[in-house]
Image: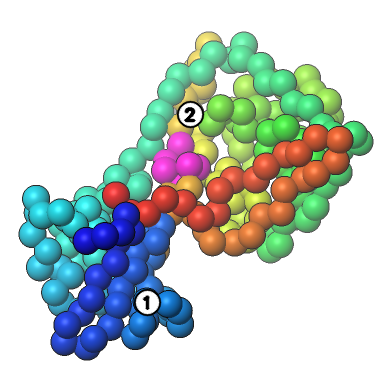
């Protein structure tokens, strides 16, 4: 009752449970030795927390609850927009563009760009405000893309541009492109039967003449 964190004591096991970024941890004492616990391995009492009670927000992180099911469904609903084909992007680099390979793919990503840039088959793709753009060179000119790199689905979560995997192109007309993103773009991911926040991987920021931060990998507490 005297903490802002979601900490619970299971009086049967005499174990403490802590919820951070949608992930559960367990310990036999409060000052350390916290170990990860899958959301479907929690004591049954967690699923019995009443809606409207002071801690009902954690129900979305307890496998098998209605709240958790709703959160998983929400994680698959895209936010969509209609983008003009005339839309442009502005990409800058801290010095000469530098690239790193993306494990398990033939893609590369820029490590010193102002927005995510992915190289595929000699073409350059970027995401600016959840919209895909394409260019023939690192410097542009950037135009709204009607397709994204085919291997985007293969990007692993330890890659700093993993969140770009969740930005999609749904179709196009002579004047507009239908685009959208799911919550993965903002750092919410389905893990098992619940939603977690951040991948948990360390994405080193670029530090040169300017500092270019990476996406957050450890989000806020559930709720």
* Circle 2 residues within 10 Å: few <14, some 14–19, many ≥20: many
Residue lying furthest bottom in this view?
13
Element at badge 1?
Answer: loop
Q: Which of 82 and 94 is in front in this view?
A: 94
Residue 97, by quadrant, is top right
216 in the magenta segment:
no
Q: In this view, does 146 lie to the left or right of 51?
A: right
In this picture the colour scheme is: rainbow
For the residues labelled 2 and 1, the Cα–Cα distance comes to 46 Å
Going from N to C along the chain, the mark reached first, 2 or 1, is: 1
Q: Is residue 125 shown to the viewer in this render?
A: no
Magenta stretch in the rendered image: 181-186
Q: In this view, does 119 lie to the left or right of 2?
A: right
Q: Is residue 120 left or right of residue 67?
A: right
Question: What residue lies at 61% left-to-right and 38% top-to-bottom?
Answer: 148
Element at badge 2?
Answer: strand
x and y, in percent, of residue 98 in the image = 86, 44
In the rendered image, the quadrant that contains the N terminus is bottom left
Q: Is residue 209 shown to the viewer in this render?
A: yes
Mark 2 lies on residue: 179
Instruction: Using the image, determine if residue 62 lies above or below residue 144.
Output: below
Instruction: Using the image, determine if residue 74 lies above or below residue 2.
Output: above
Question: What residue lies at 48% left-to-right and 48% top-to-bottom?
Answer: 187
x and y, in percent, of residue 49 in the image = 12, 64
x and y, in percent, of residue 10 in the image = 20, 79
Question: What residue lies at 67% left-to-right and 42% top-to-bottom?
Answer: 213
* Circle 1 residues within 10 Å: few <14, some 14–19, many ≥20: some
183 in the magenta segment:
yes
Assign the magenta stretch its main secondary structure: helix
Question: What residue lies at 48% left-to-right and 42% top-to-bottom?
Answer: 186
Mark 1 lies on residue: 30
Q: Which of 203 and 125 is in front in this view?
A: 203
């Amino acid at each position: 009752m005297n903490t802002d964190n979601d900490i619970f004591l299971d009086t049967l096991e005499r174990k403490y449970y802590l919820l951070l970024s949608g992930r559960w941890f367990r310990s036999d004492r409060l000052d350390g030795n916290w170990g990860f616990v899958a959301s479907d391995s929690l004591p049954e009492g967690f699923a019995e927390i009443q809606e409207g009670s002071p801690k009902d927000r954690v129900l979305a992180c307890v496998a098998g609850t209605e709240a958790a099911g709703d959160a998983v469904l929400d994680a698959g609903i895209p936010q969509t927009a209609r983008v003009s084909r005339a839309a442009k992007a502005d990409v800058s680099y801290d010095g000469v563009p530098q690239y790193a390979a993306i494990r398990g793919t033939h893609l590369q990503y820029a490590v010193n760009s102002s927005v995510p840039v992915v190289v595929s088959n000699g073409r350059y793709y970027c995401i600016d405000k959840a919209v895909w753009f394409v260019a023939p060179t690192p410097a542009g000119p950037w135009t709204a893309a009607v397709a994204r790199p085919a291997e985007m689905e293969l990007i692993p979560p330890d890659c700093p541009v993993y969140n770009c995997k969740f930005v999609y192109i749904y179709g196009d007309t002579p004047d507009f492109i239908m685009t959208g993103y799911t919550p993965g773009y903002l750092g919410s991911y389905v893990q098992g039967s619940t939603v977690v926040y951040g991948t948990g991987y360390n994405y080193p920021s670029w530090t040169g003449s300017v500092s270019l931060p990476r996406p957050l990998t450890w989000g806020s507490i559930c709720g």
